[in-house]
Amino acid sequence: MCFGAGLSEMAEKPQPVQVLYCGVCGIPAEYCEFGPEFEKCKPWLIQNAPDLYPDLLKGALAKDADKVSDQLQSTSISDAGSSKPKEEVKRLPGGKIKKKEKPEVIIEKMTRNKRKCITTVKGLEFCGVKLNDASKKLGKKFATGASVVKGPTEKEQIDVQGDIAYDIVEFITDTWPDVLETSIFFIEDGKKVPAV
């Protein structure tokens, strides 16, 4: 009895399946039509996966002929040098567009022990200000204790001892010209109020 004869007849080891992912949306190319950016994916699919969507290829050939003739008629020499790259828009899953946060400085006055006040400054780091340097300058200017602490949302903020909420706006705009007065807000009675 020979055991070696049956090895050659055994099935070969299965190979992993090669999946083509879309270069635009990042999902497998055969599922692009169900994704949020199918219109943007069409040119990539026509170029890289024409066998998956043959209808797109037929429609694209007819449209390309029209587009080329329109571009040749509308293109001039002055337009060739002034092409500006479009800004990249960050998309979240589900096709939602991520909005760029506007830098806002929020000043809030909190009371502790009925008489003592703490002024909290949030958002200075988004305006390009180093919080450690800012807390030192605030402490020296107002002759109080100032420190960088983590707030309830795990973001760093500056706590300054004393009620300096209205004096601090002028100091911030004078010390750091990148911080606009229109981007500074107070929190009063739970409402966001512009400092201007």
Image (cartoon, rainbow, N blue to C red):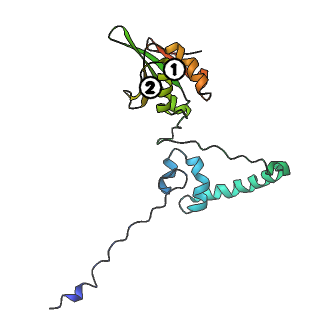
> What residue lies at 37% left-to-right and 71% top-to-bottom?
15
Residue 144 appears in the figure: yes
The picture quadrant where one finds residue 112 is top left
- In this picture, residue 153 sits left or right of residue 76: left
Residue 28 placement (x, y as % from top left): 47, 56
Q: In the depicted view, which residue is nearer to us: 66 or 71?
A: 71
Within-10-Å neighbours for mark 2: few <14, some 14–19, many 20+: many
Residue 150 placement (x, y as % from top left): 38, 30
- In this picture, residue 53 sits left or right of residue 150: right
Farthest-out residue, left: 1
Q: Secondary structure at mark 2?
A: strand
Name above or below for residue 145 compared with residue 25. above
Q: Amino acid at mark 2?
A: Ile
> What residue lies at 46% left-to-right and 32% top-to-bottom?
132
Residue 92 placement (x, y as % from top left): 49, 41
Q: In the depicted view, which residue is nearer to us: 18 or 11?
A: 18
Farthest-out residue, top: 114
Return the disc, 1 or 2, that comes first in the chain's sequence.
Answer: 1
Name above or below for residue 98 compared with residue 162. below
Q: Secondary structure at mark 1?
A: helix
Residue 62 placement (x, y as % from top left): 70, 56
The picture quadrant where one finds residue 145 is top left
Q: In the depicted view, which residue is nearer to us: 143 or 187?
A: 143
Q: Which mark is residue 141?
A: 1
Name above or below for residue 141 compared with residue 49. above
Q: Which mark is residue 158?
A: 2
Within-10-Å neighbours for mark 1: few <14, some 14–19, many 20+: few
